[in-house]
């Protein structure tokens, strides 16, 4: 998996080059902007250490490792996945790391039988198979699992088919207005518009007995560009595999929620594991979907439901009738996490944790190995510095996770098993999941935003010869000024235009940072380059291969080196800083932005509701409807009562003052050369390293206590996509007004606790 990157409008073209060249005030790593957490003298040493680190990075090695590790299918339980873990273990050891493999036995169902047939009005048997592609050397290899959606239920059903667009809540409302329901039917939905796992879940909640998910070429195929092997986009028989576990409740082994899947651990019975689905589901190609969709009758699909297949999109139900069979072997399989350590010299009990997963859906060259080989290059370079006599102040832990694709299994089980030690010691978790040519994509805790800007301001973009941060600034500014820019990009562009730090995104889920950030409250980052590539076209398919990557990903591995530089410098600085490189004013500023969004959301919801009620009173929906193709009025939205966000407003204001006091105290200390007695410095860093934990609440979010962070969470209805201030925002979006008011108070209390910790930190610095 991977977190979806910031989507900008396309068509950058030459405007980008002009802007990048003319970027007036580089805010990155220059002499005027003191290196956060370091004295001037230590900063100079750190810069020369970073140069020695960079000199160790060799793109040819990244290429070799990628080719080796993607040479066989490496899904959980496969021999090649285990061999890759052992290959990396040997490498880490040879580079001077103290390394071992930690194993967990996790529930991992694999398909034993799959069938999909159109049984009426015509007959068609789906291929459910990705054939070899000329020029792709691994595409004919045996040993892969057939395309499937892991943690869907077993089932054998025959029923009429209904097309439900992306299968999101609004789609079901539209369906109801057209008098179609899915009870007892099999739904066919297209990928996109929301997280994959929600599609069969919502289908089940609406009474469907089975679910097919296909990749429409409008979103993922020839509409986007030439298909593989001519271009990089999804061919007619390419299938997107993926997990459909309800990870928005909790990721990891479905049978061990909140604790490690260690030997002797208590396992829930399958029927009690809340993250396993209740109906069968199968991912299919647009090659297999076309005859099914073509056979549908019933009302015409609304304009924005239509894809790019050469058919008239209809909703059904029927006359198309399909037979769907899915059977899996529900057994436990081992996952192999590689864990490697370089011990710190003066603060060994503070840990910097860096991770990427190594399991793929098939060969996984893009996802995850392109990110994994950058991490390996960092590990080799750090090992070389260590052999040369350099010692990090803090302990560095490098991890290669297994079982990410089915449900963040390896990272979650490890984080749950070592929860107490991690909450005690870990000051940063730094993740990546994939990498390719393009722009830096950075997300995470906003106390780390300045660190990311400083580091990325000092790393060169291999294509444009400006810093990767200035290139990102240009991208955001151009994207934010386009006509169809999303409100988020517009907001980012406003900040970026000022010439100061470029904002980083908040993290939702879809990769291994979830347990660290959202369960344990450890400050986290997720990094990767991309955006110029064609990776969606082979995402989670057999064609995510070495041959595809070296044509369409990062042909000369220059961006692999750039990722190793950005991530490696962040690790080095966090490991070596005198005072941890965090800045809390950036978090407070970001919170102001979220508060502004929440107020606007309340106003907009109220206004939209009033408008709807007015139209209903006028019978406008009935008058508007074409009697030959009737569309009923929407369901009446509930009135919006008074929503009281004032507790949150007050906490945000108070935090702003405390953050300013902290920054002033830090600046005064920095101006004095950070002269702090060692004992005091240790206390300051201990407290700083746990600041993020005070943004958590032990009861977690409503209905999903595993998610304890009260500012960042994956949305219940977005899956990967983030919801910030989730207790309040999701209640508002779900029109649960009382809950919104309640979580405004709970979240305010959490923010007050965070502020109290910050005030303590300020007092220590004064
Ligand atoms: Zn991944």
Image (cartoon, rainbow, N blue to C red):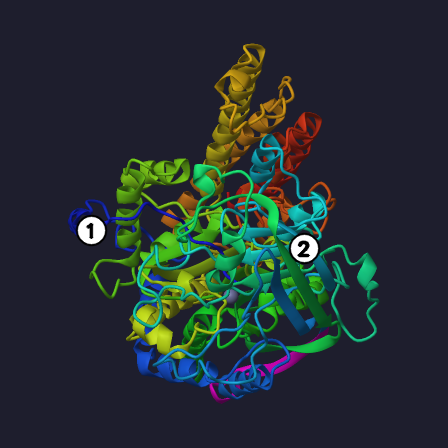
Secondary-structure class at tag 1:
helix
* Residue beneath the point at 56% across and 76% down: 341
What secondary structure characterizes most of the magenta part?
strand
Q: Quick one: which residue is furthest to the top in this view?
A: 618
| Whether residue 407 is situated above or below residue 635 in the rendered picture | below
| Whether residue 468 is situated above or below residue 749 in the rendered picture | below
The range drawn in magenta is: 93-105
Residue 561: horizontal and vertical position, in percent?
A: 34, 72
The residue that label 2 is drawn on is 210
Ligand 1 has an atom within 8 Å of the beta carbon of the residue at disc 2: no
Q: Quick one: which residue is furthest to the front in this view?
A: 121
* Residue density around tag 1, few if under 14, some if 14–19, many if 20 or more, within 10 Å: few
| Whether residue 84 is situated above or below residue 205 in the rendered picture | below
Residue 194: horizontal and vertical position, in percent?
A: 53, 48
Of the pair 165 and 96, the residue shown nearer to us: 165
The residue that label 1 is drawn on is 13
Residue 23: horizontal and vertical position, in percent?
A: 20, 47
Ligand 1 has an atom within 8 Å of the beta carbon of the residue at disc 1: no
Residue 291: horizontal and vertical position, in percent?
A: 50, 59
Q: Quadrant of residue 756?
A: top right
Left or right: 109 with respect to 223?
A: right
Asked whether the residues under the numbered discs 2 and 1 touch, taking CB atoms below 8 Å apart as contact, a structural biologist would say no
Left or right: 266 with respect to 193?
A: right
Of the pair 42 and 423, the residue shown nearer to us: 423
Label 2 vs 1, first from the N-terminus? 1
155 in magenta: no
Residue 520 visible: no
Could you tell me how far apart the alpha carbons at marks 2 and 1 are, in whole angstroms? 44 Å
């Amino acid at each position: 998996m991977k977190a979806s990157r910031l989507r900008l409008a396309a068509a950058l073209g030459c405007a980008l080059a002009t802007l990048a060249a003319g970027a007036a005030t580089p805010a990155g790593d220059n002499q005027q902007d003191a290196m956060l957490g370091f004295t001037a003298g230590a900063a100079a040493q750190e810069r020369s250490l970073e140069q020695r680190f960079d000199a160790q990075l060799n793109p040819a090695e990244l290429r070799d490792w990628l080719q080796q590790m993607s040479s066989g299918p490496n899904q959980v339980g496969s021999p090649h996945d285990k061999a890759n873990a052992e290959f990396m273990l040997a490498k880490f050891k040879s580079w001077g790391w103290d390394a071992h493999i930690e194993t967990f036995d996790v529930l991992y169902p694999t398909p034993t039988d799959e069938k999909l047939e159109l049984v009426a009005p015509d007959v068609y048997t789906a291929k459910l198979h990705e054939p070899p592609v000329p020029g792709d050397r691994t595409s004919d290899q045996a040993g892969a699992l057939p395309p499937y959606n892991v943690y869907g239920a077993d089932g054998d059903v025959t029923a009429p088919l209904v097309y439900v667009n992306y299968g999101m809540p609004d789609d079901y409302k539209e369906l109801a207005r057209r008098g179609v329901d899915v009870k007892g039917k099999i739904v066919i939905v297209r990928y996109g518009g929301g997280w994959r796992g929600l599609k069969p879940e919502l289908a089940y909640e609406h009474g469907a007995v089975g679910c097919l998910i296909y990749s429409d070429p409008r979103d993922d195929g020839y509409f986007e560009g030439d298909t593989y092997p001519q271009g990089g986009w999804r061919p007619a028989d390419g299938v997107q595999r993926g997990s459909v576990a309800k990870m928005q409740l909790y990721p990891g082994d479905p049978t061990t929620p909140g604790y490690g899947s260690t030997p002797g651990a208590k396992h829930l019975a399958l029927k009690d594991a809340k993250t396993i689905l209740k109906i069968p589901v199968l991912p299919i190609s647009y090659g297999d979907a076309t005859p099914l969709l073509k056979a549908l009758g019933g009302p015409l699909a609304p304009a924005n439901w239509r894809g790019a297949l050469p058919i008239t999109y209809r909703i059904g139900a029927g006359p198309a009738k399909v037979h769907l069979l899915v059977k899996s072997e529900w057994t436990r399989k081992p996952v192999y996490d590689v864990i490697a350590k370089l011990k710190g010299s003066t603060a060994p009990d503070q840990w910097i944790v860096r991770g990427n997963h190594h399991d793929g859906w098939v060969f996984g060259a893009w996802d995850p190995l392109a990110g994994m080989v950058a991490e390996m290059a960092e590990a080799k370079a750090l090992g070389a510095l260590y052999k040369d006599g350099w010692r990090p102040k803090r302990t560095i832990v490098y991890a290669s996770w297994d079982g990410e694709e089915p449900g963040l299994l390896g990272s979650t089980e490890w984080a749950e098993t070592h929860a107490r030690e991690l909450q005690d010691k870990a000051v940063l978790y730094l993740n990546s999941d994939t990498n390719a040519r393009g722009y830096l994509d950075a997300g995470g805790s906003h106390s780390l935003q300045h660190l990311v800007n400083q580091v990325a301001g000092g790393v060169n973009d291999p294509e444009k010869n400006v810093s990767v941060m200035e290139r990102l600034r240009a991208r955001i500014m151009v994207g934010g000024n386009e006509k169809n820019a999303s409100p988020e990009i517009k907001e980012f562009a406003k900040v970026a235009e000022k010439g100061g730090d470029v904002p980083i995104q908040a993290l939702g889920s879809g990769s291994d940072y979830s347990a660290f950030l959202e369960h344990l409250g450890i400050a986290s980052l997720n990094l990767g380059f991309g955006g110029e590539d064609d990776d969606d076209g082979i995402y989670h398919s057999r064609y995510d291969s070495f041959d595809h990557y070296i044509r369409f990903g990062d042909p000369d591995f220059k961006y692999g080196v750039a990722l190793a530089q950005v991530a490696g410098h962040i690790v080095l600085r966090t490991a070596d800083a005198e005072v941890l490189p965090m800045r809390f004013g950036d978090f407070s500023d970001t919170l102001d932005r979220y508060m502004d969004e929440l107020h606007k959301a309340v106003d907009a919801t109220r206004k939209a509701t009033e408008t709807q009620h007015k139209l209903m009173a006028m019978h406008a929906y009935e008058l508007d409807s074409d009697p030959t193709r009737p569309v009923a009025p929407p369901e009446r939205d509930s009135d919006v009562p008074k929503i009281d966000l004032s507790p949150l407003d007050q906490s945000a204001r108070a935090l702003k003052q405390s953050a300013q006091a902290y920054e002033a105290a830090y600046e005064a200390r920095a101006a004095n050369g950070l002269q702090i007695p060692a004992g005091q410095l240790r206390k300051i860093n201990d407290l700083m390293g746990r600041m993020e934990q005070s943004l958590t609440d032990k009861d977690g979010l409503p209905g999903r206590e595993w998610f304890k962070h009260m500012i960042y969470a994956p949305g219940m209805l977005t899956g990967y996509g983030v919801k910030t201030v989730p207790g309040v925002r999701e209640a508002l979006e779900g029109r649960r007004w009382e809950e919104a008011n309640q979580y405004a108070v709970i979240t305010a209390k959490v923010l007050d606790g965070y502020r109290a910790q910050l005030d303590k930190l300020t007092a220590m610095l004064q």
